[in-house]
Image (tube, rainbow, N blue to C red):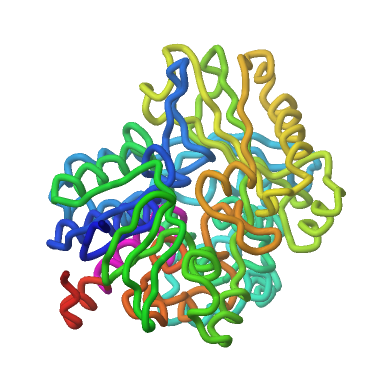
Amino acid sequence: MSKKYDVIVIGGGPGGITCGALLAKWGAKTLLIEQNETVGGKAVTPTNKDGFSYELGPKLQVPAQGPSFAVVFKELGMESQLKPIPLDRAGLAYRGPSGKYKKGTLPASTGLSPQPFFELWDLEPSKHEVALNFLINMAMMPPEQVAALDDLNSVEWLDQFKDLPEQLLDYMRMHANASLAEPIDLVSASEQVVIMQDIALRGAAGYYVGGFGRVLNDIANAMKANGGEIKTKTKVQKIKVSNGRVTGVTTDSETFDAPIVVSDAGIQPTVLKLVGEKEFDHGYLSWVRGLVPSWAFTGVKYFLNKKLLPDQMYNVWASDTTMNLQRYQDMRAGKIADEIMFFSTVPSNFDPNMAPPGKQCIVAGTICSPDPKAKEIQTLHDRLDKMWDKLYPGFMDALMYKEVEGPAEVSQFTRDSVMHGQGGECVGLAQIAGQCGKHTPSPQAPIGGLFYTGFDVGVRGMGTHRASGGGIKTARMVLRYKRIRGAVL
């Protein structure tokens, strides 16, 4: 016999576990089904046999102040458990007009002058004022002006400022790649501005005691404490639909009934695979197929036998290593430059318990195709090795071993590949012009009782903040739907 619930949530990423925990807190009989051994999705934080803890790729919390996780923890009555750690030190290396990389450690506190950046960039004093005015105006741009940028990519927007120094443009290009995992000439200008505002006004970034996985496990424990159920190592095969309404889900061995199903599996996998095309009209299917998932972030985790790097995060970039669409297409064709842009975190420089005493794990990554069969991945990993060795002497000498992951591993772990060349995306739907702001998909599907959650339908912003914010938004919508429809078994 099938088991009956008020709500079934598919997937335990930041959006799914947030949504499930809130619904359980608000009195719904909720079941969350997760295909892996633990919840967390792309933000899971495993610990290996040697005592190193780390995320699958480099992750930081933006904004540091007032992120979606703080909203969730407050609603669940466990604010004191969040335990954020602010970013204090950022190691940067930039190759600018001099033709040589200049390295520096910059403080990351809110509200500090951009002067350290100007020094890193070797920015001529005559250009300080125009750069400063641009940064201030971007940080203070009112919401209605930000919203007006939804349909512009960042290059189209930045082209309006004819006198911006190239070093500042390089920084914006790097930020688009590292923070949004997109080429800058596709990134939505409104999304990039919002994230830059978060960095400037709400704290540059942050981490958590125990990593992101610990935060998500706390939310999972709260869900169970409020009567919710979590079933791991179970993969949903089908969302059941009858007469235009969901009725539950089937797994490889069981059936579960519910009048509401929330999917954190991504809009495209949900529509095209879990529900099936025959349940949707052609216009909606065409729209779903036309949505563009984000690019991927492929990376290497370096396990060092000593504490070599002093900073909490590292960014390395140059004008000719940041990614635009043409360079992306060249990379896909096998034309990869000797140097690449990369972003990395050092978890134990936030929380010393994330690594054995005297050792470090460096989690580094760079932008790539979301195609699980992407051919450029190994070359990018090789380039990462060479960049570390060149810029941080002794790095490779301290290496004990390393682990790599790319879109193939990400897709296998978190999201089914249902369209050609897709599945290994960094987050979810791409934060590109035409898909963000007023164009963000609704959490409510055109099938009665079916909802999406997570990054694809999330709030403006970056990474887990957007994904968990999507969980909050969906949970509120489901609660309203449940009350209006009286959808209680």
Q: Position of residue 393 (x, y in %)?
A: 69, 20
Left or right: 297 as drawn, with respect to 79: right
Asked if residue 475 shows in the view, the reply is: yes
349 relative to 188, above or below = above
Snapshot quadrant of residue 188? bottom right
Residue at x 81%, y 51% (from the top left corner): 331
Left or right: 262 as drawn, with respect to 417: left
Q: Position of residue 109 (x, y in %)?
A: 40, 44
Front residue of 396 and 159: 396
Left or right: 33 as drawn, with respect to 371: left
Front residue of 248 and 173: 248
443 relative to 307, above or below = below
Q: Position of residue 238 (x, y in %)?
A: 44, 62
Q: Quadrant where the N terminus lies?
A: bottom left
Residue at x 14%, y 45% (from the top left corner): 225
Residue at x 35%, y 51% (from the top left corner): 33
Q: Which residues are magenta?
A: 460-477
267 relative to 230, above or below = below
Q: Position of residue 466 (x, y in %)?
A: 41, 60
